Image: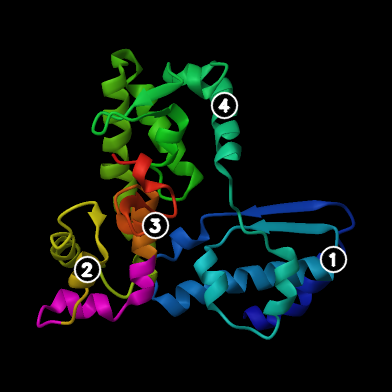
Amino acid sequence: MLDRLDTPLEQIFRTIHTGVYCFIDTVEQGVSNMDRPAWMHLQAGLIEAAWDVMTSNNHIKIYAGIREEAFAGYTSDSKINLFSAVLSLRYSPDELHQMMDSLSILYECESSFHQFVGRSHVRNMHCGVEEEAFRYVHRHRVGRPRDLVVICFELSRNRSQDSEERFCETVNRTASNVLLPLVFSEMGVILDCLQDETERTRFFGLLSHNILSDRKLKQCVRPSTDTMSWIFLNCTRTVSILVIHFVSCSTVGSLVPLRKTASTVRSRRNFGNRMT
């Protein structure tokens, strides 16, 4: 039926002579129960269809959001044409801070994020390091701007019990109980392993600390009769994804030598100053 409608629809689109803007989002959530190829190609098909529509009539602009993994994972003869029309959404910490300032003004009637949370700095309750309040919140996200909104919503609900300890507790609890579990639900369609909660628990049981030496990390993935180790070794891409998310949350770091005379805690996100 769709093939029969192709020509009539194209003719209708060509009769549009004024600006039309279409916004399409959360497609990946609607197809999250599909297997990986279907999940990937449905989103890729959306982008290619949007491109075809816009090239047939430049009065029509379609803005659609899909998962970056879907765009990176599919192949097509026309994919090369899409790169000029695709934007990868990435925000710097300063941009996110400005965004939170704007949302604080709009929704909380406060002049800035610092005014909203009632402090500019916060002392880490575990290691005693003082850091800027937004930086503390920012490092508890798992890579998505909406993570900040979720944390700020919880902070707003607990403002009547405001204290430095309460602030840290709310941020930590939200990151652990709300944000981190979403990593597995959202990544489930592209995970080759660790989809099952029991298997994840077994693997996490191998991690005795949030700071791992190189030898300890190798022990966790060393071949053995343990099923979990075998699965872990056979999904190195998944391992990389998980480690990136854990580092983003300051839940995983590594010990590396420094100038052959000392050791320091370091990660791609300056883990040493971000222990939770």
Dots 1, 4 in contact, CB < 8 A: no
Q: Which residue is mark 1?
A: 57
Q: Is residue 95 left or right of residue 260?
A: right
Percent across and percent down for residue 35 are 39, 76
Type of amino acid under label 1: Asn
Q: Nearer the viewer, mark 1 or mark 4?
A: 4
Magenta highlight on residue 131: no
Type of amino acid under label 2: Arg
Q: Which residue is mark 2?
A: 215
Which mark, residue 101? Answer: 4
The answer to whether one can see residue 12 in this image is: no
Mark 3 → mark 4, Cα distance in angstroms: 41 Å
Q: Measured along the vertical axis of the image, is residue 172 above or below residue 247?
A: above
Q: Quadrant of residue 49?
A: bottom right
User: Dot 1: few (<14), some (14–19), or many (≥20) neighbours within 10 Å?
Assistant: some
Helix, strand or loop at label 2? It is helix
